[in-house]
Amino acid sequence: MKRLIILGIVICAGTLCTHLSAQIIEGKITDASQQGIDGATVILQSADSVFIEATIADKKGNFHFRQKRENYCLTVQHLLFQTIRKCFQENNIRHHIIMHPKDNQLREIIIEGEKPLLKMEGNKLIYDITQLTNTKLVTNAYEVIKNLPGIMEYNGTLTLAGSGSVNILLNDKVSSMTYEQILTLLKSMPASRVEKVEIMYTTPPQYHVRGASINIHTPKHKTDEGKLQGEINGSYSQKQQSDGEGGITLAYTSKKFDADFTYHFTNEYSRQGNSLETLHTVDGNQHHVCQNFSGEGRSNTHLLKIGSTYKFTSQSSLSLDYTTSLTPDDQNTLTASGNQFASENISNSQIQVHNLSLYLTSASGLKTGADYTYYRNIEDQHFQTLQPVEALQKFLSSSRQVINRCKIYADQHHILNQAWQLDYGTSFSYVTNSNRQQYDAPTMSKQNLDSRIKEYTYNLYAGSEYKFNKKLSLSASVSLEFYKMMNYKKWAIYPTLQLGYIISPFHLLQFSFNSDKTYPSYWVMSGAINHIDNYQVAIGNTYLKPYTDYSAHLSYILKRKYIFQMRYSHRPHYFTQMMYLPPNELKSIYNYQNWDYMNQLTFSSILPFKIGKWWSSRLSLSAILKHDKASHYFDAPFDRKQWTGIGIWNNTFTLSQKPDIKIELSAFGQTKGIQGSYTIKPMGKTDAAIRYTFLNQAASIQLRLNDIFNSMNPYTTIRNGVQIADMSVKRNQRSLTLSFSYKFKGFKKKEVKEIDTQRFGL
């Protein structure tokens, strides 16, 4: 009986507790149209107006108090509505309270503010893409990047002002496709899928790249988006001849599994021209050579990517991707004529790239991956000399390059406390490169080549980031690397340092120091020979050494939109391809040689401004002091300095908001520059475009005219002792392009890894 009494007391107590816990005062705040009022303040008071508790209504206007009251009052307040007070005597009743707008609302006054263009987090400059592109004529991710402050496009390559070449990351991951392929994929990615972009002038080692980087973030899957999404796009360009491209991307996304499919086809026409005039001294005799050549080419490229990701939890996942690029027929014809030489050069190549990558992330902060790339290039060259008559020559050159590369890596991230983070990791890569070149002419048998190169790279790094307070942060790292290729072995240490200081919300300061190393391409290291015509030839250099880049960068950001920068870089043993006129042979040789150093000091500023809602403009200015020195460049050493100015002016004009029609005008200009013994004359270009967006921003048609005056053609001179030459390059970049894109079902684009083949091929 005693146990039954105790049990009954427990049951009653539990019932009473349940009953008391259910005592709540709840309700909903709406306007006269039954729309919930978000952010209304609800105050619970006793009948004699004594304060008891307060809460805030949610987005739908709902509120509740866990209180048991028989006599109470509710006071509801909101900035845009009249305050209301009601009293009640019953509990557990859901109240519906209707608020009415204030009579003194200033409906005619509109207060407009300008959002900050960027913010600084440690070593990153994070751009507000909506603010940056809402007035810009952009339709894809590539155009978004081109509109980033400080980004310049030159000869199909993106550069960052003051930093030269730049790496491209997708969602914190290094891509493993060729540079051209990643640009193609960015052009097929809608601008709306770029959620955030980070600029890092010094990239931390856990990203497995060095130097400056652009890190593109795409939105994660949202429950209100369709699971199957996609995008189709295409373009038609008219140059000397027509070409075009197009593709389709499909993506399936869910909470546990993602899959994506991408196919892109490109039919590309290229045209080039070059005029060369030299006073070539051979064995003490001076020869006047005038050479003109023109060439054109056409290639078809198929790009296919299949990827999948399984998400164990929100912080752990496994990704498997396969990417292939096939160029089954790349044809080029080059015809040369002049006062002493004439030739015809026809080449045909087949290129294929296959990449398989596996990537695993865990909730503990561990990230591991493996990557394998296969590259093959088979090329046949039919060469025939036409002049001089006494030296007629005809040969067939067959070359084959095969590269196998595998890489494994592991990275660990720890958050030790709110102020301190620790990163460390390691990577190993192994490359085999087989390069074969055969000539059918017996007299050229000495130029036959059959080389095999093996390359090993071991890397170990550690780094940390420490936030002293909300204004000051410091991150530093050091990488230890062992590199081996053939008989060349080198241990190297690469330190990095980044310091960010927020002086005030309108004054930001960032300093970074970076070290990096650049290796020559496998084609150059093989010592292969490429005959351009019967006067010009490109020759590799098996003795070429890599060069190191030490650079320091300082940025000052005013009002989070005006950027002023200074950068200094020192590159000992720098190399680049230049032309040399040998004293013992009437040949013009293009060759890579190590210099003493190349130093560069850069001052740059980025100045955006707006006039109303119809004109958005940005002016980018750079002043560069370049110092090139080579004490032992064959018999033609040089030691030169030169100031160069670069200006870029981008303008977007909104002709109409409904319909959405915009016009873009941009101009690029560069003063005299140098590259070793080269002197590059001033040059510039002007582009224009018009875009019409419709179907609720889902579709767009754009017409773009590139290089309107066909003026982006460098004119270069050499005046270095007996090295005398004038070169005029005709890039023929002027083109008219009509493009169309349409995205459906809330298109969500997945990132695609880039196969890094920048050192493959010629």
Image (cartoon, rainbow, N blue to C red):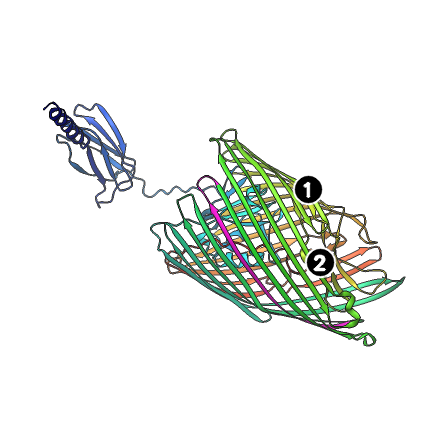
**Split into 4 quadrants, where in the image is the N terminus?**
top left
Residue 704 seen in the figure = yes
Q: Nearer the viewer, residue 41 or 321?
A: 321
Residues rendered magenta in the picture: 341-365
- Per the image, the residue denoted by label 1 is 491
Give the x, y percent position of residue 359: 49, 49
Main structural element of the magenta stretch: helix, strand or loop?
strand
Horizontal placement of 661 versus 9: left or right?
A: right
What is the secondary structure assignment of the residue under circle 1? strand
Q: Label 1 is placed on what type of residue?
A: Trp
Question: Picture coordinates of residue 100 (x, y %)?
Answer: 23, 39
Relative to 220, is 322 on the left or the right?
right
Quadrant housing the C terminus: bottom right
Label 1 crowd (10 A; few <14 / some 14-19 / many >=20): few
* Residue on which disc 2 sits: 526
Residue furthest to the right: 284
Q: How far apart are the alpha carbons under marks 2 and 1?
A: 23 Å
Secondary structure state at the residue bearing disc 2: helix
Q: In this rendering, is residue 55 above or below 755?
A: above
105 left or right of 14 in image:
right
Residue 688 position within the rendered picture, expressed as x and y whole percent measured from the top left: 54, 60
Q: Is 354 a magenta residue?
A: yes
Q: Residue furthest toward the left?
A: 1
Q: Is residue 519 above or below residue 762?
A: above
Three-letter amino acid code at disc 2? Answer: Ser
Q: Quadrant of residue 734?
A: bottom right
- Residue 685 vs residue 634, the one in the foreground: 634
Please indicate, yes or no, whether residue 699 appears anywhere in the rendered image: no
The quarter holding residue 584 reads: bottom right
